[in-house]
Amino acid sequence: MNDSSSLKFNQSTSWDVEKTTDQGILKKCRAAYWKPCLIGLVLGCLCAGIALGVVTTQLIQDEQKSMTTTSTTSTTTTSATTTTSTTTSTTSTSTSTSTTSATTSTSSTSSTSSTSTTSTTSTTSTSSTSATTSTTTTTSTTSTTTTTSVALPSQCFNYTTNSDSTRNVADKSVTSCDSTAFGSTGVWVRFVSPAGTMIATYDPGYYYCGTDAPGWYKDSYPTSAGSTVNGTVCYSWSSNSCLWSNTILITNCSTFYVFLLIDTAYCNLRYCTV
């Protein structure tokens, strides 16, 4: 009885000792591997982070390499036009020519980035050359004047000069007449200032030229030197511009006139001068 009990007790005690020993060994084992496992876990996390960073960097570089570059170039060109006009004649010639000037301007703008665009503009302007030729023709005209001497009649050298200012068409100071002044055959007379130089060619009206009925010449004077004409002198009175009349001769002496005058038919009739 005691032996069995003792055996059971011993077995039970032995089992408990073994169990306690195994638990101690397990605890020791667990204590021995805990730190290396933690270190391994940390190292694994670090390696995974490094690997993820390398992959991310490579992806970024690949995206940058895949971006494209666009280049745009625009060019503007202006063509040159040349116009030439020419006028030609004879004799003297003058020519004027303008030179040709060409101007080229180029502007370039460039920028550098991950995406770059370059624009180049070229402008060329050319001015046209204009040549003008003008010709002037001068015509010279020579005029020749031939002077022929005219033999003047004797009355141009033998005459009586009359300068009586009362005969002038504007005079009303006296009342005179020519009824006995020149005779029946007549006298060649040249009138000079202040009387005037010729007999009036219009009706002055009565009570002028120092008389009641002034006489005026109604025909044409001779136009060429040395020529003589026969004309009529009228005497104005009241409303009749030619109530009386007589005939006279007039000679053109180149620079003056002479008159062959006769007596008037009545008194208070007088030759009127201007």
Image (cartoon, rainbow, N blue to C red):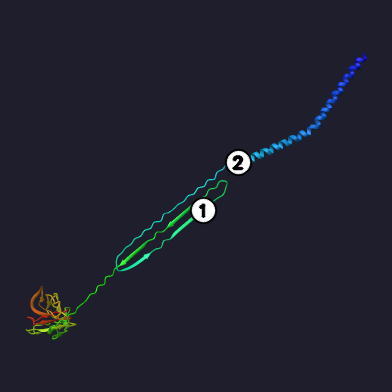
**Residue labelled with disc 1:** 108
Q: Is residue 173 visible?
A: no
Q: Position of residue 32 (x, y in %)?
A: 81, 32
Residue 138 in the image: state x and y as whole percent.
28, 70
Q: Secondary structure at mark 1?
A: strand
Q: Residue furthest top?
A: 1
Q: Nearer the viewer, residue 80 or 242?
A: 80
Q: Is residue 124 visible?
A: yes
Graded by Cα atoms within 10 Å as few (under 14), some (14 to 19) or many (20 or more), the crowding at tag 1 reads few
Which quadrant of the rendered structure holds the C terminus?
A: bottom left
Give the left or right position of residue 110, taking residue 203 as reference.
right
Q: Secondary structure at mark 2?
A: helix
Which three-letter amino acid code belongs to the residue tagged 1?
Ser
Could you tell me which quadrant the N terminus lies in?
top right
Residue denoted by label 2: 62
- Rendered location of residue 129, percent (x, y): 39, 60
Q: Of the residues under marks 1 and 2, which one precedes in the sequence?
A: 2
Disc assigned to residue 65? none
Amino acid type at image mark 2 = Asp
- Residue 132, above or below 36: below
When the figure is inspected, residue 105 is found, relative to residue 210, above or below; the finding is above
Q: Residue at x 76, y 34 (%)?
A: 38
Q: How busy is the neighbourhood of tag 2: few (under 14 within 10 Å), some, or many (20 plus)?
A: few
**Residue 141 occupies quadrant:** bottom left
Percent coordinates x, y for residue 65 in the rendering: 59, 43
Identified at 92% across, 15% down, the residue is: 3
Which of the pair 212/78 is nearer the observer? Answer: 78
Q: Residue at x 49, y 55 (%)?
A: 106
* Lateral position of residue 36 relative to residue 251, left or right: right
Q: Nearer the viewer, residue 239 or 27?
A: 27
